[in-house]
Image (cartoon, rainbow, N blue to C red):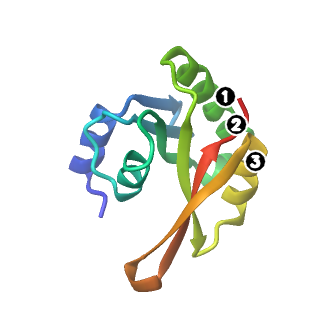
Amino acid sequence: MLTAERFDRMIGAAGIATFIEPGQAFLLAFEQADDYDGIHFKWFRSRYGRFLYVDRVVVAEEERGRGLGRTLYADLFTRAGQLGHDRIVCEINMQPPNPGSDRFHAAQGFCEVGRATLDDGAKTVRYLLWCRN
């Protein structure tokens, strides 16, 4: 469960925390050595020596379809290059399905590198790697 205290710690630990005002969208990403304990982050950490993990991308419902996600990711790709990262990773839900996120990440150049089933089969995720540099 994400509490306000945990969210504050996440923002403080994130290698990249981008916000589009006024409260329209944000993105949090962690470098492999950041102090973060997310289960999906740990999956990538066990497989890759160096990476930038996108943990959260949130766009306000009333702002969706206006390109804010693309703007956040364009900024992320620029910052990743500045930090020397060529491996950007994330996960998206398969169960429950998230077709909008599937389409978005495919359009951004991500490809699947693994899967995991969690919560006694209630949730399945796809692990993605940015395949287009």
Which is more toward the observer, 124 or 46?
Answer: 46
Q: Decide: is 30 above or below 4.
A: above
Relative to 6, 86 lies left or right: right
Residue type beneath disc 2: Arg
Which is more toward the observer, 28 or 30?
Answer: 30
Q: Earlier in the sequence, mark 2 or mark 3?
A: 3
Disc 3: which residue: 65
Q: How many marks?
A: 3
At label 2, counting other C-alpha atoms closer than 10 Å, the crowd grade (few under 14, some 14-19, many 20 or more) is some
Q: Would you say the residues marked 2 and 3 are in contact, meaning their CB atoms lie under 8 Å apart?
A: no
Q: Would you say the residues marked 1 and 3 are in contact, meaning their CB atoms lie under 8 Å apart?
A: no
Q: Measuring from the top left, give residue 43's x and y in whole percent.
A: 40, 55
Q: Would you say the residues marked 1 and 2 are in contact, meaning their CB atoms lie under 8 Å apart?
A: yes
Q: Decide: is 127 above or below 36.
A: below
Q: Decide: is 39 above or below 5.
A: below
Q: Measuring from the top left, give residue 70's x and y in whole percent.
A: 70, 36
- Under tag 3, what secondary structure? loop
Disc 2: which residue: 70
Which residue is drawn at the image coordinates 49% and 30% (left, top)?
Answer: 18
Which residue is drawn at the image coordinates 30% and 34% (left, top)?
Answer: 34
- Under tag 1, what secondary structure? helix
At label 1, counting other C-alpha atoms closer than 10 Å, the crowd grade (few under 14, some 14-19, many 20 or more) is few
> Where is the N terminus found, in terms of image quarters?
bottom left
Disc 1: which residue: 74
